[in-house]
Amino acid sequence: NLTLQALAKFGRVFLDRAAEERALDAAVAGFDIRGSRRVRVGNLSGGNQQKLLFAKTMLSDPRILIIDEPTRGIDIGTKQQMYGLIRARAAEGLGIIVISSEMQEVIGLADRVLVMRQGRIAGELSGTEIGEEAIVRLAMGVGARGPVGGQAAGPPPGAAEGAHQGDGGAPGAGAGRTAAGGTASHARASVGA
């Protein structure tokens, strides 16, 4: 399963089983994948499944990696491991796009954040601009900067001019798939190069 995306690396006509075993050894060690090597992937813990998927993807030597909800459903220790793996790959020059509903994950990983509201980019934040309040304001459409151009975003469609929706409408508002007036907001974090 690990080598499926990169089969060309493991033989032309016949697979080099020894090379596949070495790749698995490297993945188990490099990504701290725990459990029996012979167990089906679906029987691994959620965190080990995520780490195996990450290892499998990295085996194909991508230049850009898009990760959607990289830590959903995994324990806090494995989340920290995933954050370390993501940061390490970004430090190596890999371009990484993280799509997450965890606002602290976005804030902690991102060099740049694009917040989406109603299917459109509501704004872009970078460096010290990245923070919970700024993300929530963009996601809610309340007095935030427009995307890159710096124009103020108007009130959300159907809202009275100058109305303030507040940030209490949805738990975790702004950093991902949140229900706010029936619309979905997303935060995309660009990490690294």
Image: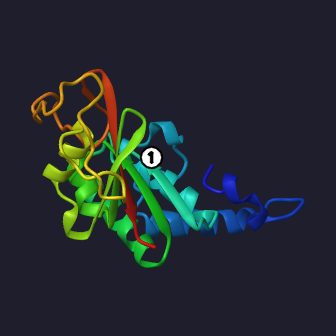
Residue at image location 42% in from the left, 40% down from the top: 120
Q: Position of residue 63 (x, y in %)?
A: 58, 68
Q: Residue at x 63, y 49 (%)?
A: 1
Element assignment for label 1: helix
Is 46 left or right of 75, judged from the image as shown? right
Q: Position of residue 36 (x, y in %)?
A: 47, 50
Location of residue 103 with respect to 166 vertically, above or below: below
Quadrant position of residue 122: top left
Question: Left or right of 62: which side holds 175?
Answer: left
- The residue furthest front is 161
For label 1, count other residues whose C-alpha is less than 10 Å away and answer few (under 14), some (14-19) or many (20+).
some
Looking at the picture, tell me which residue is in the foreground, 11 or 68: 68
Location of mark 1 (residue): 49
Q: Look at 60% across and 54% down and name the residue there.
A: 2
> 61 and 99: which one is in front?
99
The answer to which quarter of the image holds residue 192 is bottom left
In the rendered structure, the answer to whether residue 86 lies left or right of residue 167 reads: right
Number of callouts: 1
